[in-house]
Image (tube, rainbow, N blue to C red):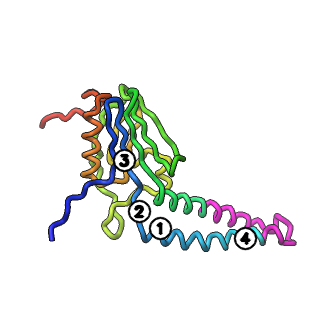
Amino acid sequence: MVETPHKGRAIIIQNFNNLVIEIPSKKNIFQLIFISFWLCGWVFGEYFAINQVVNSETPIFGNLFLLFWLCGWTIGGVFAMLSLLWMLFGNEVVSVEYNKLTIGRLIGKLGIKKSYEIREIKNFDVDSTPLNLDIFGNERRGDISQVFKNNKGKLKFDYGMKTIRFINEVDESEAKFIFEKLKISSKFTKENFKQVIPE
């Protein structure tokens, strides 16, 4: 049986004035199930710990360890919830308009967007860094800490003295396709892109 060519995951909207690329987060069924069950246990742990602190006759300083544990447990639960929401509703959004490149990582309508002046972008290229694989040979995707950072991705460019990386939720082939779409955008010029020097 012949494999059907993959059509990609990016949703690309292009018109005369702007280009918008939206990439839904990848859904890992095992992780979704695991985090969902873990959060059920987290809710019970949170409830009993808070109840123990509030209703305890021990002076507050006597419950310092429990309070310390509760803080860590709460932070862990928040990150787990954000991870779940990212897998369910997360999107990487890249737009080109008004001579600006805007990169966003959003959960629904919430998240962080950063804009960059296109005339200041240099060495725009596909990142050829070797893949970071897990024990099963699958590419490691950015975890929830990467939702609000621009330090991972298959595309990159220099912006002043900083390298910006983005597009982390697609395979390398689709990243190259997106790169070419950006490259032919009317807002970019050849000065924005890495110059290939013949050997």
> Of label 1 and label 2, which has the lower sequence position?
2
- Distance from disc 3 to disc 2, alpha carbons, whole Å, reads 16 Å
The residue beneath circle 1 is: 32
The residue beneath circle 3 is: 167
Verify CB contact (< 8 Å) between mark 1 and mark 4. Answer: no
Q: Which residues are magenta?
A: 52-76
Q: Which-is-in-front pick, marks 1 and 3?
A: 1
Q: Can you tell which mark lies on residue 27?
A: 2
**Mark 3 crowd level (few <14, some 14–19, many ≥20, 10 Å Cα):** many
Relative to 177, residue 71 above or below: below
- Residue at the location (38% across, 43% down)? 165
Q: Can you tell which mark lies on residue 134?
A: none
SS type, badge 4: helix
Measuring from the top left, give residue 133's x and y in whole percent. Answer: 33, 62
> Of label 4 and label 2, which has the lower sequence position?
2
- Residue at the location (45% across, 68% down)? 31
Q: Which amino acid, by three-letter code, is at mark 3?
A: Ile
Q: Which amino acid, by three-letter code, is at mark 2?
A: Lys
Instruction: Tell me if 83 is positioned left or right of 140 in this view.
Output: right
Q: Which-is-in-front pick, marks 4 and 3?
A: 3
**Mark 2 crowd level (few <14, some 14–19, many ≥20, 10 Å Cα):** some
Q: Which-is-in-front pick, marks 1 and 4?
A: 1
Q: Which-is-in-front pick, marks 3 and 2?
A: 2
